[in-house]
Amino acid sequence: MYVVVWLSNYHAAVLINLLPKDIKSATGIINNLLYLTPNRGLMYVGDLVHNNIVHRLEHLSCFLPGLMALGAHTLDLPPDQKELHEWAAHGLAYTCATSYADQATGLGPDEMTMPTGKKWIDEVKKWKDAGRVGTPPGMQEPPTEKSSSHRDYVNSWSNAYLLRPEVRFFYCKSFLGLLAYGYCADCREYLLHVADNWRRQMAGTRLRDLPGY
């Protein structure tokens, strides 16, 4: 993992043994598992089950933006590969942040079932072939959607929150300058907002019985 390499301060043995495999895995994710929803064009990473793509975004997959950002910042990647890593980090981070901002509670879903979208790498190729005009696919940052009936995903676990804050936003903010928190200026403000909202509006509500989630 890029994180292991970073924390080990580029220890030669770690680099030799891990980096080729990690770069190959990241490239495989970019080329095969990243998709865009048909409505807002939100980027998501699907799951591969028995060699079939399952169009869902699990919250644990939201570590990937930080991983991609760390790799793009830390490794000596070819310019075109670094660009893809940065775009993937940006698009995935925005989707993960938007999934929080979409909810009335400010708490993101554990799992989102997506409609079958377009493969991101194919859309990037079309965009490049057309002259790289405008914003790259998956980077448009569409607005939040408070109405669950109008979102381009379904909360698979509709009234449960089993999560915790993660470091992905720190990496994306530090390495890419991303501030993809919807209605808050940075991660600290976002978490304070969620905590305050929880105390004032949902005191005593169980995390498995959330109103308006």
Image (spheres, grey):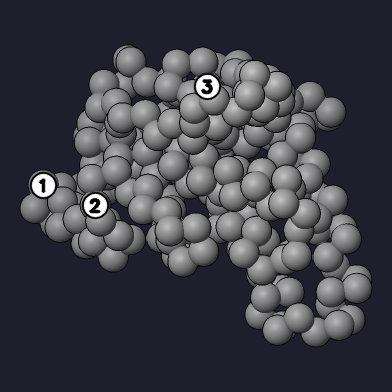
CA–CA distance between discs 3 and 2? 24 Å
Local secondary structure at mark 3:
loop
Q: Is residue 178 left or right of residue 148?
A: right
Three-letter amino acid code of the residue under disc 3: Thr
CA–CA distance between discs 3 and 1? 32 Å
User: What residue is at 78 percent from the left and 45 percent from the top?
Assistant: 27
Local secondary structure at mark 1:
helix
Sequence-wise, which precedes: disc 3 or disc 2?
3
Kindly identify which residue carries mark 1.
201
Task: From the top left corner, tell me how far across and down residue 68 is, in percent.
Answer: 63, 54
Density class for disc 1 (Cα within 10 Å; few <14, some 14-19, many ≥20) is few
Three-letter amino acid code of the residue under disc 2: Cys
* In the depicted structure, whether residue 84 falls above or below residue 46: below
Density class for disc 3 (Cα within 10 Å; few <14, some 14-19, many ≥20) is many
Q: Is residue 156 visible?
A: no
Q: Is residue 19 visible?
A: yes
Closer to us: 16 or 165 = 16
Q: Is residue 45 left or right of residue 40?
A: right
Residue most extreme to the front: 131
Three-letter amino acid code of the residue under disc 1: Gln
Quarter holding residue 120: top right
Quarter holding residue 18: bottom right
Q: Is residue 169 left or right of residue 80?
A: left
Local secondary structure at mark 2:
loop
Task: From the top left corner, tell me how far across and down residue 164 is, in percent.
Answer: 42, 59
User: What residue is at 30 percent from the left and 31 percent from the top?
Assistant: 144
Kindly identify which residue carries mark 3.
37
User: What residue is at 44 percent from the left and 42 percent from the top?
Assistant: 94
* In the depicted structure, whether residue 166 falls above or below residue 96: below
- Which tag is nearer the camera, tag 3 or tag 1? 3
Kindly identify which residue carries mark 2.
184
* In the depicted structure, whether residue 57 falls above or below residue 183: above
